Image: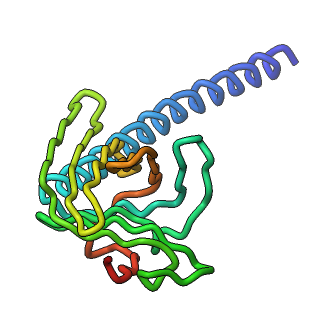
Amino acid sequence: MKRIVVLLAFIISATIAMAQVKDEKSSSTKKEKRNARLEKEYQLTRDMLHNRDFVLEANFLQDRYGHRVPVSAGLNFVAVDSTEAIIQVGSNYNLGANGVGGVTAKGNITNWELKENKKKKTFNLRISVMTAIGIYDVALSISPYGKATANLTGLSAGMLTFDGDMVPWAESIVFVGRSL
């Protein structure tokens, strides 16, 4: 009887030890996968910024008072294509001058300042866009995963914040309305 108890205790302790070894291996594998995914997303984001070919598809818009509303990513965006930029705010429910219930401002980029934090793998981009309806400053904060926030300011008081995902222009789902 004593031998059976000792044998069972040995088997149970060996099983627990093996489970801990497997758990350590799986957690290191998960960490390696997460780091590989982070590096891949970071390189994609970096390439989009250096090629000046991306669209920030906004899932949320926020005004200067902090009122945050969910919006359609296909109608609300900030797009950059080489030397041009498009800033659009639209609505699924109303029609406007641009055909999508809002405003579309298309113009040339007059200023481009890109700063990269290699340690945190984040980016800060400041651009100025000269359009037919005004001059806009856009300050983007971009995570390594391509999540971005863009603060839009113009010549008048006020600010609009676009919060969403950055995607390459070719993979974008946006519908560009008529620019004013």
In the image, residue 132 above or below residue 96: above
Which of the two residues, 71 or 170, is positioned nearer the viewer here? 71
The colour style of the image is rainbow
Is 105 situated left or right of 27 in this image? Answer: left
Look at the picture and state if 117 lies above or below 4.
below
Most extreme residue toward the front is 156
Rendered location of residue 30, percent (x, y)? 45, 41
Camera-nearest residue between 173 and 136: 136
Q: Position of residue 58 (x, y in %)?
A: 46, 60
Q: Residue at x 59, y 42 (%)?
A: 66
**Between 59 and 161, the one nearer to me in the picture:** 161
Instruction: Quadrant for residue 1, please give it.
Output: top right
The percent position of residue 97, horizontal first and vertical second, equals 44, 81
Q: Residue at x 40, y 80 (%)?
A: 175
Residue lying at the far right in this picture: please name it: 1
Left or right of 36? Residue 18 is: right
- Residue at x 48%, y 39% (from the top left corner): 26
Q: Residue 118 appears at what percent x and percent y?
A: 21, 31
Q: Quadrant of residue 76?
A: bottom left
Q: Quadrant of the C terminus?
A: bottom left
Q: How many marks?
A: 0
Q: Is residue 5 above or below residue 138?
A: above
Q: Residue at x 26, y 75 (%)?
A: 170
